[in-house]
Amino acid sequence: MGTGINFYPSTQNQKRLTIKILIMKKALIFMTAVGMLLIAVVTGCQKNATFIYKAPTVVVTTPVSFSKNLVPLFTANCALSGCHVSGGQTPNLTAASAYASLSGGNFFNVSNPSSSIIYERLTGTLTPEMPFGKPNNPSNINALVLAWITQGAKNN
């Protein structure tokens, strides 16, 4: 037989070809993973919209005591170091000064309770929303403050 063209590669050439194919597959997998990661990073680091969830309004029908219901909430959420304390942000919501500070600074409006500054801050109608850096409406403070103002904003 003659020296014609051999269509079947030798065993050594088959091994080289197999190794090249494996290297190419690994490179393809690696490049795909890097590409997907880049896509995730680039598209995942942008803000398209802000969703504001407004929780259902809770209506308080029982009498609200300023000293028993609100002062403990102000103490836990507002009268903190650097916030609504003596020498800090107004109003001063420490137990001894809260009522005088709120009434003297016109922070509540008994004729239109929902337009009161303190209520609008708590609900986010006015910014910054309070309590700053804390979950919105801790211990149902929004409804309690609105009920207290609606009930005449008494120092009780």
Image (cartoon, helix red, strand yellow):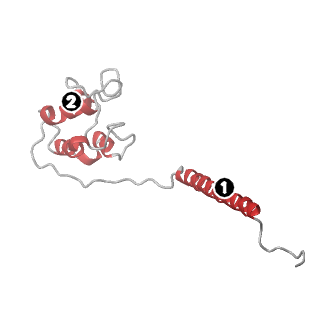
Mark number, residue 99: 2
Mark number, residue 131: none
Residue 30: image x %, image y %?
Answer: 62, 54
Q: Amino acid at mark 2?
A: Tyr
Element type at mark 1: helix
Q: Nearer the viewer, residue 34 or 65?
A: 34
Local crowd size for mark 2, using a 10 Å CA cut-off: few (<14), some (14–19), many (≥20): many
Q: Which residue appears at 17% of the width and 41% of the height?
A: 148
Asked if the residues shown at circle 2 and circle 1 are in contact, with their CB atoms under 8 angstroms apart, the answer is no
Q: Residue furthest top?
A: 87
Compared across the picture, whether 8 is left or right of 47 comes to right
Earlier in the chain: of badge 2 and badge 1, it is: 1
Residue 1: image x %, image y %?
Answer: 88, 79
Disc 2 from disc 1: Cα separation: 70 Å
Judge whether residue 50 can be spotted in this image: yes
Q: Amino acid at mark 1?
A: Ala
Between circles 2 and 1, the one closer to the viewer is 1
**Which quadrant of the figure has residue 32?**
bottom right
Q: Which residue appears at 27% of the width and 28% of the height?
A: 79
**Which quadrant of the figure has residue 134?**
top left
Instruction: Quadrant for the C terminus, please.
Output: top left
* Relative vertical location of residue 99 with respect to residue 39 in this rendering, above or below: above
* Relative vertical location of residue 3 with respect to residue 146 in this rendering, above or below: below
- In this figure, which residue is indicated by the disc labeled 1? 27
